[in-house]
Image (cartoon, helix red, strand yellow):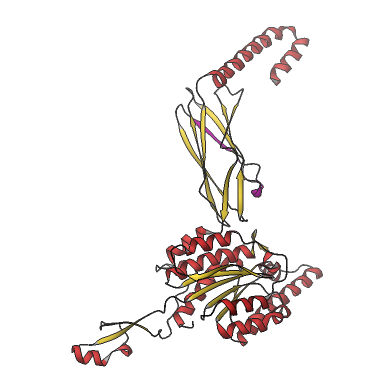
């Protein structure tokens, strides 16, 4: 069209051009009409469908697919624009392709949500062009599709697969050397090479006239409680996920592994009050109940009340249990305000306090300073990093087990601690 306009302007000065430009103009009009007839009046059309999973996994890359088929009697070029939920803040998602007559293609992209809740997709817009390419026809599909985002069930599946294989080391899971054994007797069996000779049952050996050994098994049905701090200290974000969401994802995984290890899994959450309680059980529906409870957890912007937590646990958890407490302490003063309650919990249960390294401070501490201000910032960062280590030492001094971890390593380190406790028979 620009060339035609320029041609008509030049033909004002050069009259000999006018006839040629006029022919080109009529040719352009014929092609425009032909393009319109092909796209808008023929029987063909574009069909498309967005394929969504039942739910998305928080903090993970989730595949989203859509299929586009060409039902026109001629090849078309297509441009697909999917209206992604506003939480992702993406406005430039496009896919281009060319489809032959009757051809269908599947396209895939990935989304990584960082908040739990309901996400709404807009329309899947598909623009079709013929070989002429003057016009595009828009098609709209799958308007207002909604999908929930749950805690990271993809992590649950991954660790469920590897926790009972010999590939644990590939994911950072340690092989824990068993120290002794638990005293839950299982059976007497014939001795085979490799059995511990200290377990030989001499009475049974005398009766059978062959070596017999006692076989023991891990103690089962031990309560494992994940306790999640919902206070303001868990609102801090790392890699777009809050500390609360990291704790939620780890709780889901460790609960599943505990149940698969024949233990009972439960949870509760607290801030200024204790709520979201799931009693530790090993029934088939336990994981679904924990998943639904975790889905609804939100951070409260208040200071957490550890005294309420202690009173609630003392009243409601009578059997000695493993308590995995997900919280965060930035200073020794913050720890000392709650240390009395943690000591009281550790007397009745096996308490593991899990809190987080500040990876942003680590970055500050490792950066080479270039001026006085950066030297000052690095010194402050190193002070806070050192204080985290002092918190670990202070808790260990009172016999409280700890995990100081980077947020992204939380799940791995929690599984390692659980396996270590089971191997050492501490519970």
Q: Could you tell me residue 326's position as x and y percent?
A: 61, 71
Is residue 49 a member of the stretch shown in magenta?
no
For the residue pair 76 and 61, the one nearer the viewer reads as 61
The residue depicted at 41 percent of the width and 79 percent of the height is: 219
Q: Could you tell me residue 346's position as x and y percent?
A: 58, 83
Q: Could you tell me residue 240's position as x and y percent?
A: 65, 58
Is residue 98 a member of the stretch shown in magenta?
yes
- Residue reaching furthest to the left: 209
The residue depicted at 64 percent of the width and 9 percent of the height is: 23
For the residue pair 250 and 300, the one nearer the viewer reads as 300
For the residue pair 157 and 104, the one nearer the viewer reads as 157
- Relative to 256, say whether 147 is above or below: above
The residue depicted at 64 percent of the width and 12 percent of the height is: 24
Picture quadrant where residue 183 is located: bottom left
How many marks can you see?
0
Residue 157 in view of the camera: yes
- Residue reaching furthest to the front: 315
- Relative to 183, say whether 61 is above or below: above
Please give left or right for residue 213 compared with residue 76 in the image. left
User: Magenta segment range?
Assistant: 86-100
Please give left or right for residue 149 compared with residue 338 in the image. left
Residue 171 in view of the camera: no
Q: Could you tell me residue 167's position as x and y percent?
A: 42, 67
Report the quarter where the N terminus lies. top right
The residue depicted at 49 percent of the width and 60 percent of the height is: 288
């Amino acid at each position: 069209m620009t060339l035609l306009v320029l041609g008509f302007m030049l033909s004002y000065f050069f009259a000999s051009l006018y006839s040629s430009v006029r022919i080109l103009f009529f040719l352009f009009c014929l092609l425009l009409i032909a393009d319109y007839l092909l796209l808008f009046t023929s029987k063909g059309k574009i069909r498309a469908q967005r394929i969504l999973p039942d739910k998305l996994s928080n903090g993970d890359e989730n595949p989203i697919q859509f299929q586009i088929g060409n039902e026109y009697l001629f090849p078309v070029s297509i441009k697909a624009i999917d209206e992604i939920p506003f939480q992702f803040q993406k406005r430039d998602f496009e896919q281009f392709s060319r489809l032959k007559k009757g051809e269908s293609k599947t396209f895939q992209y990935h989304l990584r949500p960082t908040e739990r809740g309901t996400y709404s997709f807009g329309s899947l817009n598909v623009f079709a062009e013929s070989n002429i390419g003057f016009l595009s026809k828009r098609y709209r599909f799958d308007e207002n599709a909604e999908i929930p985002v749950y805690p990271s069930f993809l992590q649950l599946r991954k660790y469920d697969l590897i926790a009972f294989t010999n590939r644990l080391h590939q994911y950072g899971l340690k092989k824990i050397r068993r120290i002794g054994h638990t005293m839950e007797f299982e059976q007497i069996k014939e001795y085979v090479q490799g059995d511990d000779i200290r377990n030989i049952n001499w009475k049974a050996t005398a009766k059978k006239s062959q070596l017999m050994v006692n076989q023991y098994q891990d103690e089962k049905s031990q309560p494992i409680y994940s306790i999640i701090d919902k206070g303001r200290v868990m609102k801090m974000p790392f890699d777009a996920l809050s500390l609360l969401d990291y704790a939620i994802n780890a709780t889901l995984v460790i609960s599943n592994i505990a149940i698969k290890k024949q233990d009972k899994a439960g949870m509760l959450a607290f801030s200024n009050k204790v709520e979201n309680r799931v009693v530790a059980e090993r029934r088939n529906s336990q994981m679904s109940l924990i998943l639904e409870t975790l889905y609804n957890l939100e951070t409260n912007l208040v200071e957490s009340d550890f005294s309420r937590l202690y009173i609630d646990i003392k009243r409601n958890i009578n059997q000695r249990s493993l308590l995995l407490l997900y919280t965060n302490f930035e200073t020794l003063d913050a720890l000392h305000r709650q240390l009395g309650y943690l000591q009281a919990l550790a007397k009745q249960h096996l308490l593991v306090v899990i809190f987080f390294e500040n990876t942003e401070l680590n970055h500050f501490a490792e950066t080479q300073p270039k001026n006085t201000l950066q030297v000052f910032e690095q010194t402050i960062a190193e002070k806070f990093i050192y204080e985290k280590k002092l918190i670990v030492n202070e808790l260990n001094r009172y016999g409280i087990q700890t995990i100081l971890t980077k947020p992204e390593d939380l799940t791995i380190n929690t599984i390692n601690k659980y396996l270590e406790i089971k191997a050492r028979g501490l519970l």
